[in-house]
Amino acid sequence: HTLWHGLQALDLSPTATRLWGALMLGQREQLDRADWQVLSRTGTSHLLVISGLHVGLVAVMAMALVGLVRWIKPINSAVGMRSQAWAGVLAGFGFAVLSGFGLPAQRALIMLVGLLWSRLLGLQINFAQRLGLAFAVTITWQPNSLFSLGLWLSYGAVLALGLVWYRCQERTLY
């Protein structure tokens, strides 16, 4: 990885290079036993697992950046919304690839595309339909994931967030 070599070029301590590589790029194989012991004792080992949340956060940051640009220099609303969605998908895809494109990253990317589908193509599809489409693509792409707790937790969490969002929007209408 080019970024891994960039980290090494910063001339950090070997431990810092290994930890930053694991945190930013998911390069956990660079960590030695002593590193894992420290992470375990401090309760921070979960930070090294690249998950759907990380892919989603990178996508949201890219979308927010494009949104900021849209705010500074207003453009057509439909074009702006599509550009934000594409920025999120491309950033999410790039991060998923950088992290090793593991199953959780793939699932997150499928869900991200599924949820942004209507913005990407300018279609009128509700949240449940988008999430259902993403779920169908996920189990088609990864049929064994039906038996994975991660699949159910991921989709359950997104469904719960969607329901909370819907409920909050409903209250603002009155």
Image (cartoon, rainbow, N blue to C red):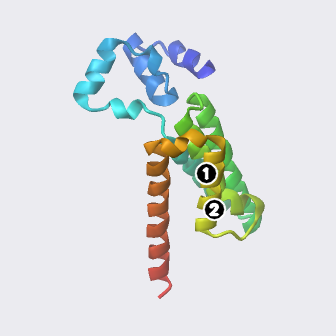
Could you tell me which quadrant the N terminus lies in?
Answer: top right
Q: Is residue 156 visible?
A: yes
Horizontal arrangement in the rendering, residue 60 relative to residue 124 (left or right): left
Q: Is residue 69 visible?
A: no
**Residue 160, position in %: x, y?**
44, 62
Q: Amino acid at mark 1?
A: Leu
The numbered dot on residue 95 is none
Task: Say which residue appears at 60% left-offset and 29% top-offset.
Answer: 98
**Residue 32, position in %: x, y?**
37, 12
Task: Say which residue appears at 36% left-offset and 34% top-offset.
Answer: 46
Horizontal arrangement in the rendering, residue 33 relative to residue 102 (left or right): left
Query: Element under label 2?
Result: helix
Query: Element under label 1?
Result: helix
Q: Earlier in the sequence, mark 2 or mark 1?
A: 1
Question: Can you identify the residue that label 1 sits on?
Answer: 112
**Residue 63, position in %: x, y?**
61, 53
Task: Say which residue appears at 49% left-offset and 61% top-offset.
Answer: 159
Work out whether residue 8 or residue 137 is closer to the camera in this orientation and state it: 137
Q: Nearer the viewer, mark 2 or mark 1?
A: 2
Q: Amino acid at mark 2?
A: Arg
Question: Can you identify the residue that label 2 sits on?
Answer: 130
Q: Decide: is 116 above or below 103.
A: below
* Neighbour tally class for label 2: few under 14, some 14-19, many 20 plus, Cα within 10 Å: many
